[in-house]
Image (cartoon, grey):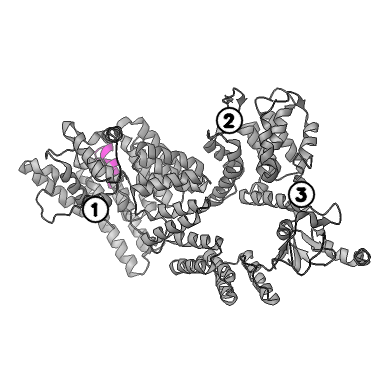
Amino acid sequence: MTTRGTRSEKVKRIFQQFDANRDGGLNRDEMAALVVAVNPRVKFSDEQINAILDEVFRTYGDFIDGEKGLTYDGLLRTYDDGAGDVDRDFDALELELNDDNKGSSIEAEASSSSIVDERVMESQKKQRTAAWAVSPNHGIVFDDTWKIVDDLEILIKRLKSKQAKDGKFKADNFDAFSDAGWSRELGPSSEISEKRVFWEESGNDYAAFVKDLGVLRSRADGARSREEAFDGHMAIGRVLYDHQLFKEALVSFKRACELQPVDVRPHFRAGNCLHVLGRYKEAKEEFLLALEAAEAGGNQWSYLLPQIYVNLGIALEGEGMVLSACEYYREAAILCPTHFRALKLLGSALFGVGEYRAAVKALEEAIFMKPDYADAHCDLASALHAMGEDEKAIEVFQKAIDLKPGHVDALYNLGGLYMDLGRFQRASEMYTRVLAVWPNHWRAQLNKAVSLLGAGETEEAKKALKEALKLTNRVELHDAISHLKQIQKKKVKGNGGANGEGVFVIVEPSKFKTVNDKTTLRQDLANALQIRLFQRITRLSRCDVELLKKEMGENDVPVSYSGSGVPEKSIRKPNLEEILRRLLNFLKPETFQGAVKAVNERILSVLDDTGSGRVDLGTFYALLAPICSGNPEKRKRVAFDALLWRPVNEAGSQIKKADAVRYIKLLRAIYIPSHGASEMLELHGEEDSSMVSFKEFLVMFDDPDWGFGIMSTLVKLETGDRNRHGKCVCSVCRYPIIGSRFKEMKSHFSLCSQCYSEGKVPPAFKQDEYKFKEYVSEAEAMKDKCKCLPLQSHNDR
């Protein structure tokens, strides 16, 4: 890892290379030469060069020395802010570090002897603590603060020595995992340690340290001025942060916030501490305060805005608010177009919400600026896989692994890609490499078992499953083990599919019959299963439909006008995400991210077909209502009320028939895409101006052919899709049947809901047609078996 000293020397050599007139500054011509030289593959136009220079000279105005141009400190700051990669630029220019001390300080070249002496003193200070301490904008200002810092370093050294002696001091290497990409400091990311330190806070030695730290804080509070007290607390916080004593650092930064509430720095660093401590909501609040202070401070803090935007975005991601995070990453990238971390984070967030093409574009830009960015390669490969470009994705995953051989995310995701392609042996190799780095990764262990099963290595798969069972006791592992036993018991060979699935034939839908009206039709079940899957991913089936009504009543939205001049209550996607967060406040952040992705891909992509970034909120509520929890009639009522809530219908108790028709077709296009997509094309005709009441709306809604009559099947799934049927297993997939059981009444084999919906039957039972009866529970089946055996044999005759 590049040290700060080495980094500074490299920047100095770059500066000297392009300071042609040796005046201690880079003017526009010299800066233009630098930009072109470090980007040899890019053909810049004069307009592009001028735009880049305008941005640099505006953003780093505090470092511009008149006609001389950008100072060495200014160039160093541009690299510190992520505007470029020092190592890459240094190598591109084929420069070498000098070992002599001649010209060791650029400013000292034309300085008097007294100033040189002063610089020697500064150099000694720099050796005593971190590089930030002598930074012109973020360093120590008062001499007494240096004394406090020296005493604090001694206290920390003493604590570390005691805890190391007792075996309490721990450091874990995080090099294997994807970098969060955030700016922990108002400085270079290369200063971030790859080792996370864990302090033992419960012992007497730590208590004594905190007590002594309190004395140092009192000394800072007793300073001669408010500014000096602020300087002391900021320095204490910085030193504590550098040593990863985040809780104590937070106390100091909070005190600094009290002393100078409108200063950006303490809010920013308090936010960083809170983020590391996992307190994302509080971190977001601090970053917002930093942003407010920076925007109010004019040009003074303008060069810090990109980093504030980046960290604010990451804090929002910590809360699961990915759409909102995208907005801030975009702002950072706009303010600093060469901020490759902002572009990487933007690409990763866009991938996280299912906007794959935009994600690929942002990630490719980040990699163009930093070709050795392993995390960006990993996420780019995932986005390519999502778009179906699998072979290219494999190449990019491999590049990420070449750059960082123990990259867990790249190895795990590449394993998943190989699984999707049916290359099970390669998949198991990837999962084995994941487990070598992260032995307690239970998902990798489970997927390794599945891939081994797909490769026909049943015994090895069983061993891997048992290992996974040691790591977690989740129910899916028990089902997988039961499945393995069934596979071995039946001696069924694979059908070229995954998971040891048995041989089957797919029967055309017309041959699937039902014995009564209570048995769900095959196609209806297939559609309802897809909707049920969406409910599970989004957890909307746990959201009471009354909450939608409450949102409409308590949080009104200003009326705006669409391109066609129609009044509507439209809202931007990030604001819509906030509403979803309130509705799904019981979800953990990572689960909420998955819910947002599903909603964005399935609903928002249809509502925002023009790509404006805005959606009609009333229509959105109406589309959610049928899949929320609650009485089915209540769901339909809330859907109607949501349409009534729209500005075009607010006046009375009826809605336009055209709006009702459009809504039904949207429902079908979103939840039954095989039927609804073509119907959406019919919307562009003459609009019916008549009105419909709630009663008439229900008739339209419940229509089995042109409405959303599938809702009755969905409700049946909601109430019974967790029912188990004893030891009964599906005759095709060999998994225990969960949910409805479909029994073929002539051959007496049973299918699970999934195999029934896909038309799969065992090849041993070839018939001209198949008649099925649905059993929601095993009790129904037992009752039928006891009472209806004579009737069944009569039918067979």
Left or right: where 39 falls relative to 493:
left
Q: Are marks 2 and 3 in contact (CB under 8 Å)?
A: no
- Which residue is disc 2 drawn over? 570
- Which residue is disc 3 drawn over? 713
Q: Give whichever of discs 1 and 3 has the lower sequence position.
A: 1
Say which of 112 and 341 sits in front.
341
Say which of 112 and 82 sits in front.
82
| Residue 753, horizontal then vertical, whole percent | 73, 58
| Residue 665, horizontal then vertical, whole percent | 70, 37
Query: Magenta span covers which residues?
Result: 219-230
The Cα atoms of the two marked residues, 1 and 3, are separated by 64 Å
Q: Residue furthest left?
A: 113
Q: Quadrant of the N terminus?
A: bottom left
The secondary structure type at the circle numbered 1 is helix
The secondary structure type at the circle numbered 2 is strand
Q: Is residue 271 visible?
A: no
